[in-house]
Image: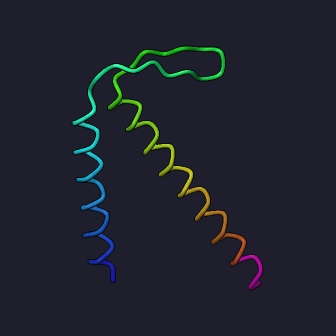
Amino acid sequence: MTRFKIIVFAIVAILLVIVVLQNTETVETKFLLLTIPMPRAVLLFVTALGGFVLGLVAAFGFSRKSKEAKT
């Protein structure tokens, strides 16, 4: 099962890199009161990274709650 997870992770990472590299034109991103011009690749990477971090935090929170419930 661990080998399967590594393969899936590698495929998703490669697909992410392909999408990021194909989107290099500049876009204006509005965040609160700021307008930030940046390459679309950077925006996609930051968004993907944010989703990854939120997923880790959620997984850690759920696993911690289940451990506390068992004790």
Colour treatment of the image: rainbow
Q: For the C terminus, which image quadrant?
A: bottom right
Q: Is residue 48 left or right of residue 60?
A: left
Please indicate whether residue 46 sits to the left or right of residue 23 in the image: right
Residue at point 29%, 77% (across, down): 4
Vertical order, 24 against 11 (above or below) = above
Q: Residue at horizontal 59%, vertical 14%? A: 34
- Left or right: residue 6 compared with residue 46: left
- Quadrant of the rendered image containing residue 46: top left
Residue 48 vertical placement versus 23 (above, below): below
Closest to the observer, 62 or 36: 36
Start-end of magenta stretch: 67-71
Question: Viewed as shown, does residue 61 lie left or right of 14?
Answer: right
Magenta highlight: main SS: helix
Seen at 25% across and 61% down, the residue is 10
Nearer to me, 55 or 28: 28
Q: Position of residue 44 (x, y in %)?
A: 39, 37
3 shown above or below 15: below
Determine the residue positioned at 33% across, 83% down: 1
Q: Is residue 54 above or below residue 45?
A: below
Residue 63 location (% of width, % of height): 63, 72
- Find residue 2 and report its horizontal and vertical position in percent: 32, 78
Of residue 56 and residue 38, the one placed in the foreground of this image is 38
Q: Is residue 70 magenta?
A: yes
Give the tally of numbered discs: 0
Q: Nearer the viewer, residue 62 or 64?
A: 62
Q: Quadrant for residue 31, please give it.
A: top right
